[in-house]
Image (spheres, rainbow, N blue to C red):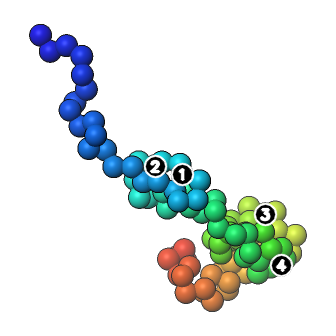
Amino acid sequence: GYGGGGGGYEGVHLSYQCHECFRNFNSQNELNMHMQVHRPRNVSCPICGETRFRSGANAVQHVESGYCSGCRGASNARDQIYRFASSQRSMNHYLT
């Protein structure tokens, strides 16, 4: 019979390790996502000026979530986000 054992791919598995905390991930994409946690929180919200975000995208999420104290209404928040995002070349793919 064919007892025990897996598929025979053991040992072929590549691991992607974080050089900061040495956690292992299954793919480069998972590692890239994880690396965000090690980024400094030095990005400011363009609306309220709070500096506690790791990226412009995080600042935009803060505004979109409605927690930004500098926004008056959701449509105003969207206008502000669009203005901010269009000034950040790296964020053009977030614009629709």
Amino acid marked by disc 2: Phe
Is disc 3 surrounded by few (<14), some (14 to 19) or many (20+) residues within 10 Å? some
Query: Residue 48, position in %: x, y?
Result: 84, 77
Q: Determine the secondary structure under disc 1.
A: loop
Mark carried by residue 25? 2
Badge 2 or badge 3: first in the primary sequence: 2
Q: Residue at x 69, y 78 (%)?
A: 81
Q: Nearer the viewer, residue 15 or 54?
A: 15
Q: Residue furthest left?
A: 1
Q: Which residue is mark 3?
A: 66
**Of discs 2 and 4, which sits in the foreground?**
2
Amino acid marked by disc 1: Phe
Task: Please say if 51 is above or below 61.
Answer: below
Q: Distance of mark 3 from mark 1, alpha carbons? A: 35 Å
Horizontal side of residue 15 vs 5, given as left or right = right
Q: Nearer the viewer, residue 92 or 2?
A: 2
The quarter in which the N terminus is drawn is top left
Mark carried by residue 49? 4
Q: Residue at x 14, y 15 (%)?
A: 2
